[in-house]
């Protein structure tokens, strides 16, 4: 009997197979494949994902706009259950419900120890999916594959760093939790932390998708008087009002004219750039809509071979404007993910409304087409096991 138990344990904790959506090369979309998955090593855990968010950043991979090692397992928003752990794991144990942070937080590197977990040193291999020891956990035949952001939540199972795991309370649905691993804190923090929105401010947000909608919520919660959204998609403008936008416009020119009138020419205190694809035109609109001492916060990314920031120094100097980037919304995952879930519980943060549609893994390409067609704020993959 003991031998049977030992053999079963070895099988369970050894190499397994998993279905996953992978990107082989740009412009080929996502391919569903069966992969081998190694067991977790030191400070690693194997996760059975129940839900994965469909963020625009993953679409940048299939468009060739991201510097990512291909082929790669997609997905960097996910929540599930810890199935097994490698040696020396202390943060979680088998059976724990977790949400994965797309940027890990080791708690001991220089960034973490100075309150900047969003820049943890453990996140340095995000584009390769390679673990710190130079190896990979996903395999397709003789080919090694990484998971995007060393996660790969478009797989039913994945091996991830324990530093990417955040305990998840039993009352939070997996599909809600998945979004709090990236899109929610990135947008929320872009307004509350990176921009530093304060009561009475006027804020202009360019792009009202999964990240922009949360920038709207953050600006509203911080007390902004005017939360102005610019998005060409009617559905997104309509939903932006649900999340707290006070005014919405289809183009930047209309928004600019409103801001001039509403502020009596003083212009906006903040402009936050959260479109699906950042362009030079959006950045210039953001700079021009901010007034004296205003700040432009850039959260979105653009095409890899195009530069989106071309600003004459005079535009910055004359009004003492600031232009800065924001990673993960300046959030600290170990603190802010539980904090945001607490605001969701109290009704101060709308997360159910973010999910427009749920998809099976096999529908991942249709899900991204729906995103491009402006039908979704955020789609979610529900994994079937």
Image (cartoon, grey):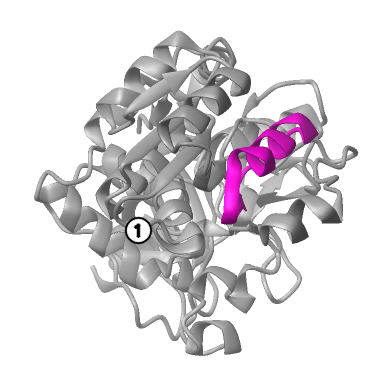
Q: Nearer the viewer, residue 174 or 258?
A: 258
Q: How many marks?
A: 1
Q: Where, by quadrant of the figure, is residue 100 drawn?
A: bottom left
Q: Kindly tell me whether residue 6 is visible in this rendering.
A: no
Expressed as whole percent of the image width and height from the top left, the position of residue 316 reads 74, 56
Q: Where, by quadrant of the figure, is residue 70 drawn?
A: top right
Expressed as whole percent of the image width and height from the top left, the position of residue 240 reads 36, 26
The outermost residue toward the right is 305
Considering the numbered disc 1 on the image, is that residue within a helix, a strand or a loop?
loop
Q: Residue at x 46, y 28 (%)?
A: 261
Q: Residue at x 43, y 31 (%)?
A: 228
Residue 100 versus residue 174 in the image, above or below? below
Expressed as whole percent of the image width and height from the top left, the position of residue 167 reads 27, 65
Residue 288 on the magenta span? yes
Q: Nearer the viewer, residue 244 or 351?
A: 244
Expressed as whole percent of the image width and height from the top left, the position of residue 81 reads 30, 54
Span highlighted in magenta in the image: 279-300
Q: Where, by quadrant of the figure, is residue 207 drawn?
A: top right
For the N terminus, the image quarter is bottom left
Residue 167 on the magenta span? no
Q: Kindly tell me whether residue 245 is visible in this rendering.
A: yes
The outermost residue toward the front is 264
For the C terminus, the image quarter is top left
Q: Residue at x 61, y 23 (%)?
A: 252
Q: Residue at x 77, y 50 (%)?
A: 315
Q: Nearer the viewer, residue 228 or 192?
A: 228
| Residue placed under numbered mark 1 in the picture | 198
């Amino acid at each position: 009997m003991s031998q049977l138990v030992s053999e079963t344990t070895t099988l369970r904790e050894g190499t397994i197979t998993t279905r996953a959506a992978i990107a082989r090369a740009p412009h080929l979309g996502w391919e569903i494949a069966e992969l081998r998955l190694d067991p977790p090593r030191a400070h690693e855990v194997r996760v059975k994902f129940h839900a994965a968010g469909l963020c625009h950043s993953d679409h940048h991979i299939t468009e060739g706009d991201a510097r990512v090692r291909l082929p790669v397992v997609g997905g960097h928003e996910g929540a599930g259950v810890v199935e097994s752990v490698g040696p020396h794991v202390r943060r979680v144990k088998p059976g724990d419900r977790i949400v994965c942070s797309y940027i890990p937080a080791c708690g001991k590197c220089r960034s973490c120890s100075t309150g900047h977990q969003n820049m943890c040193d453990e996140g340095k291999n995000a584009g390769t999916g390679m673990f710190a020891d130079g190896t990979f956990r996903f395999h397709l035949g003789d080919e090694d594959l990484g998971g995007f952001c060393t996660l790969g939540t478009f797989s039913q199972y994945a091996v991830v760093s324990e530093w990417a795991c955040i305990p998840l309370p039993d009352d939070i649905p997996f599909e809600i939790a998945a979004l709090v691993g990236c899109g929610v804190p990135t947008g929320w923090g872009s307004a509350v932390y990176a921009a530093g929105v304060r009561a009475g401010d006027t804020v202009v947000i360019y792009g009202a998708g999964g990240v922009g909608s949360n920038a709207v919520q953050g600006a509203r919660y911080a007390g902004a008087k005017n939360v102005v959204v610019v998005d060409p998609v009617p559905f997104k403008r309509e939903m932006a009002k649900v999340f707290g936008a006070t005014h919405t416009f289809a183009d930047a020119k209309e928004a600019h004219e409103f801001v001039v009138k509403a502020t009596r020419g003083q212009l906006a205190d903040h402009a936050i750039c959260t479109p699906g694809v950042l362009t030079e035109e959006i950045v210039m609109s953001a700079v021009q809509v901010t007034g004296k001492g205003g700040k432009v916060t850039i959260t979105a990314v653009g095409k890899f071979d195009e530069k989106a920031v071309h600003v004459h120094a005079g535009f910055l100097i004359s009004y003492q404007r600031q232009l800065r980037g924001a990673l993960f919304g300046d959030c600290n995952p170990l603190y802010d993910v539980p904090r945001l879930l607490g605001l969701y519980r109290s009704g101060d943060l709308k997360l159910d409304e973010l999910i427009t549609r749920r998809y099976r893994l096999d529908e991942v390409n249709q899900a991204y087409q729906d995103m491009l067609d402006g039908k979704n704020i955020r789609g979610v993959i529900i994994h079937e096991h």
